[in-house]
Image (cartoon, rainbow, N blue to C red):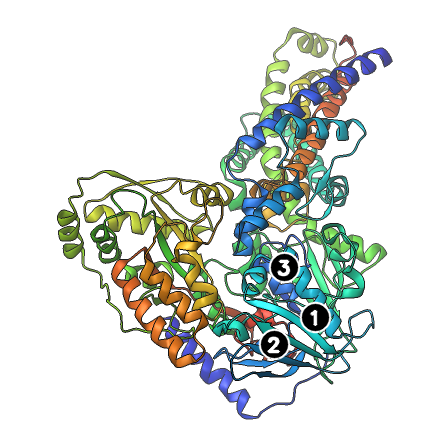
């Protein structure tokens, strides 16, 4: 197993390098550069100003040289400097990463836990009112745009009921510490995490239900039943365990997008995470920062793919490792 | 509808003003800042949000009234020599930087040298300066090469912020660590900045105007979504929405919320004006008749009433009615599609394709682009909209790769500072923004703008600007749309926020909270 992980890590580094080079050129295909953006924002520009900015961003050098400098930096774990924000890219990302991980991991946990639970319930009581209710709700949440759910949630719970804060990560200026602070962050977390979680929950519910019903029909389940095992045991140990594999696959894919995937939610709820950082960097053509976010989120995808493979093995010991 | 709201507010707020209340001390104000500024070092970064936050931290030598008359700032008095070439400023004694070091004329001299390298607008404003001297610690003397009428208008904090010499002299400006913790002389001091969340400023206890500021703290909240910003105001989490914080269509609704006060004041210095850049190099648009036809074809009253919810004013020409030397004695273009069609026919336009770039600044501009496209199609023009984001659009415009493009620019209080740059021949330079990108060139206009800038008396200046406005309105180098208005919406408990011609950008020095 260790050699499997090692081999996968080596492959991962090669893939990462390819991603970096590809992204480097892709980003520069977009018209406009940071100097253009900053000149525009300043409301004035002359030759010297734009030239100074280009020099500052290193844009006056030939493209291959820029790439070489960048890759060299990455090799020494230096993600470069965001001239626009006057700070090292690694620090900017590190500042935002906890907020994003808190949001997406919570959403992920909610969606996976509830999704599987509802899926199992729906499959167990297939054809009943409960099943119909779960299926319809899942379909609604699956089909409704995220931002709309977010806005309605704000309207309901912030504007009308005044139960939950509508934006931000914590109550600014309140100076809470300890448990009070945790509760405060928690209150801010409820709506964005629920909004983001609902969509994925709907996916897992539908997936689990379908998969359960399929496994239920297989011969070994009939055998188990013939042996006289109790329903609960059959459902848990025979059906669910086998039905989970496709859900794990899907969850693995989703987990990879945890870092960069919450742009919309973070924007609507003013959550200070990576998604917004990436979006701002794109709008401002902050090349180094944008590449930095790409590198980090690509690395996350690679890592989560590896983790998914390991989880497969846990869920189904018949699966063997080979790189 | 908005008029009614404004009237109601005048009455409502007027009642409290009658008592001439004493400012109360203390309190925290939450304001919205949008988008998040790239930095707060005003001498290095000049975009709108930076000016808005940093106007509290830094100060200029002068401030300007809503009528754009100079007011004392870091300079408590000034004299202008009879030949209008020597400006002598007396600095206020006892002013200190936030770190306790005294502010002196040496800081002024240093700031000017630094700004010439880092601040494009300051560099251009200072072109006429022959030398700057500091005979003593509290005196600064500017000697000009020749009289320059707008010179007294360039000392506002955003145009010429004062920088602490002791922290910047001899360092690499770009990487100076103080850029992240700016030190100024202003009423508020930088405290902390949580990227993506908020910027926090605290009261400067040693501020040179005794008793001010009244507030303890300001939080500038960073909320990226426009709808979320209006909700934040609605739920009382935010007290100040500076102009442009929420979408225009939301302004009437939010203005009517209980406890909301609205004002259009505070934009006199910037006086934003929107227009369509018409690429005069395009053979079709090179024809004056086609350009005039566009002026007749675009329904600007409709745009004002429907797209901008009644905010703003239809522009008459290159100058905005709130800046110096504005003249409305110019050819006018009322909405007249029939006349537009006739002019197009005269010009021999046969339906050639024209590319139009809307401004990627949100919904209002998107809709405006659609409305203008419709207007122009109605008179028979073949318009193709090019979709792009801001950097892409900027690049196209500065490389002259467009036919018609939306924009809006500030006028900085004086035609020589904010108007002439868009029309004079010497301002044609590829690869730059906000100059004469339309490629209009008229020697007479060049001469009149030059005269207007250097004439020794205001009467002479006015003469030149009256003429040039007439010529430009006749020639239509660009198609002027609206004098824009960005109303500032506040909770009524925030008093005395906007007192000068630069509005919120002048900082919260006079503001207080009625608890």
Residue B465, how many percent across, how many down? 36, 71
Within 10 Å of disc 3 (Cα), the crowding (few <14, some 14-19, many 20+) is some
Residue furthest bottom in the image: B19
Which chain does the residue under circle 1 lie in?
A: B
Residue A182, how many percent across, how many down? 79, 52
Which chain does the residue under circle 2 lie in?
A: B
Give the SS element for disc 3. Answer: helix
Give the SS element for disc 2. Answer: strand
Query: Quarter-wise, where is residue B333 in the image?
Result: bottom left
Q: Are marks 2 and 1 in contact (CB under 8 Å)?
A: no
Q: Residue at x 59, y 43 (%)?
A: A34
Which residue is nearer to you in this view: B269 or A196?
B269
Q: CA distance from mark 2 to mark 1?
A: 12 Å
Q: Residue at x 80, y 31 (%)?
A: A77
Which residue is nearer to you in this view: B426 or B353?
B426
Total residue callouts:
3
Which residue is nearer to you in this view: B496 or B176?
B176
Residue tagged 3: B116
Q: Are marks 2 and 3 in contact (CB under 8 Å)?
A: no
Whichever of labels 2 and 1 marks the residue nearer the N terminus, that label is 2
Q: CA distance from mark 2 to mark 3?
A: 18 Å
Are discs 3 and 1 both within one chain? yes
| One can see residue B27 in this view | no
Residue B432, how many percent across, how many down? 49, 48
Which chain does the residue under circle 3 lie in?
A: B
Residue tagged 2: B62
Residue tagged 1: B108
B319 in relation to B374, above or below: below
Whichever of labels 3 and 1 marks the residue nearer the N terminus, that label is 1
On screen, residue B42 versus residue B84, left or right, reads right
């Amino acid at each position: 197993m260790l050699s499997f992980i090692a081999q996968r890590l080596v492959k991962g580094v090669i893939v990462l390098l390819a991603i970096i080079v590809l992204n480097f050129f892709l980003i520069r295909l977009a018209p406009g550069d940071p100097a253009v953006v900053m000149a525009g924002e300043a409301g004035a520009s002359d030759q010297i100003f734009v030239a100074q900015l280009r020099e500052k961003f290193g844009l006056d050098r030939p493209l291959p040289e820029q790439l070489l400098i960048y890759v060299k930096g990455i090799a020494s774990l230096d993600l470069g400097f965001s001239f626009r924000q006057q700070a090292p890219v690694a620090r900017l990302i590190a500042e935002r990463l906890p907020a994003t991980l808190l949001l997406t991991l919570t959403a992920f946990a909610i969606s996976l836990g509830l999704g599987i639970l509802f899926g199992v319930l729906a499959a167990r009581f297939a054809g009943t009112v409960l099943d119909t209710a779960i299926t319809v709700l899942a379909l609604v949440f699956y089909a409704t745009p995220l931002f709309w759910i977010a806005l309605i949630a704000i309207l309901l719970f912030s504007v009308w009921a005044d139960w939950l804060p509508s934006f931000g990560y914590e109550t600014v200026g309140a100076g809470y510490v300890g448990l009070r602070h945790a509760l405060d962050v928690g209150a801010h977390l409820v709506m964005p995490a629920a909004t983001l979680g609902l969509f994925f929950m709907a996916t897992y519910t539908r997936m689990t239900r379908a998969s359960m019903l399929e496994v239920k029909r297989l011969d070994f389940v009939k055998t188990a039943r013939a042996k006289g095992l109790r329903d609960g045991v059959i459902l848990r140990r025979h059906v669910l365990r086998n039905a989970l594999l496709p859900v794990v696959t899907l969850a693995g894919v989703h987990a990879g997008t945890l870092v960069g995937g919450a742009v919309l939610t973070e924007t609507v709820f003013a959550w200070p995470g990576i998604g917004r950082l990436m979006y701002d960097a794109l709008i401002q053509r902050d090349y180094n920062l944008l590449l930095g976010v790409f590198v980090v989120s690509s690395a996350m995808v690679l890592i989560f793919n590896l983790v998914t493979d390991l989880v497969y093995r846990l869920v189904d010991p018949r699966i063997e490792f080979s790189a | 509808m908005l008029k009614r709201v404004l009237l109601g507010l005048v009455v409502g707020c007027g009642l409290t003003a009658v008592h001439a209340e004493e400012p109360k001390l203390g309190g925290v104000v939450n304001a919205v800042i949008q988008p998040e500024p790239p930095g707060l070092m005003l001498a290095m970064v000049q975009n709108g949000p930076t000016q808005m936050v940093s106007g509290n931290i830094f100060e200029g030598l002068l401030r300007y009234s809503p009528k754009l008359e100079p007011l004392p700032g870091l300079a408590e008095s000034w004299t202008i020599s009879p030949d209008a070439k020597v400006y002598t400023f007396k600095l206020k004694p006892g002013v200190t930087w936030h770190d306790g070091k005294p502010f002196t004329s040496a800081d002024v001299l240093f700031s000017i040298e630094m700004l010439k390298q880092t601040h494009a607008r300051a560099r251009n404003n200072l072109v006429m300066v022959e030398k700057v001297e500091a005979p003593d610690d509290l005196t600064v003397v500017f000697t000009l090469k020749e009289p320059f009428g707008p010179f007294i208008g360039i000392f506002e904090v955003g145009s010429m912020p004062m920088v602490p010499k002791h922290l910047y002299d001899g360092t690499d400006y770009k990487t100076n660590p103080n850029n992240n913790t700016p030190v100024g002389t202003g009423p508020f001091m930088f405290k902390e900045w949580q990227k993506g969340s908020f910027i926090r400023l605290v009261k400067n206890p040693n501020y040179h105007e005794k008793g001010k500021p009244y507030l303890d703290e300001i939080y500038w909240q960073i909320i990226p979504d426009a709808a979320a910003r209006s909700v934040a105001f609605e739920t009382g989490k935010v007290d100040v929405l500076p102009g442009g914080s929420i979408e225009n269509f939301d302004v009437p609704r939010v203005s009517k919320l209980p406890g909301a006060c609205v004002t259009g004041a505070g934009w006199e210095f910037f006086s934003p004006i929107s227009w369509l850049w018409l690429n005069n190099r395009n053979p079709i648009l090179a024809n004056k008749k086609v350009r005039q036809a566009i002026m007749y074809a675009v329904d600007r009253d409709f745009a004002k009433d429907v797209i901008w919810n009644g905010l703003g004013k239809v522009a008459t020409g290159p100058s905005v009615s709130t800046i110096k030397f504005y003249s409305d004695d110019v050819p006018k273009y009322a909405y007249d599609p029939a006349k537009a069609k006739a002019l197009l026919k005269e010009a021999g336009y046969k339906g050639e394709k024209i590319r139009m770039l809307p401004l990627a600044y949100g919904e209002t501009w998107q809709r405006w682009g659609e409305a203008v496209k419709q207007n122009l199609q109605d008179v028979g023009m073949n318009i193709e909209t090019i979709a792009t984001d801001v950097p892409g659009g900027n690049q196209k415009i500065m490389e002259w790769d467009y036919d018609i493009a939306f924009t809006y620019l500030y006028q900085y209080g004086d035609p020589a500072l904010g108007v002439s740059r868009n029309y004079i021949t010497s301002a044609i330079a590829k690869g730059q923004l906000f100059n004469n990108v339309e490629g209009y060139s008229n020697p007479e206009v060049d001469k009149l703008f030059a005269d207007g800038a250097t004439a020794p008396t205001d009467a002479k200046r006015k003469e030149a600007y009256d003429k040039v406005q007439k010529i430009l309105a006749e020639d239509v180098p660009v198609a002027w749309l609206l004098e824009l208005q960005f109303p500032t919406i506040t909770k009524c408990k925030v008093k005395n926020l906007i007192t000068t011609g630069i509005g919120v950008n002048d900082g919260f020095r006079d503001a207080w909270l009625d608890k």
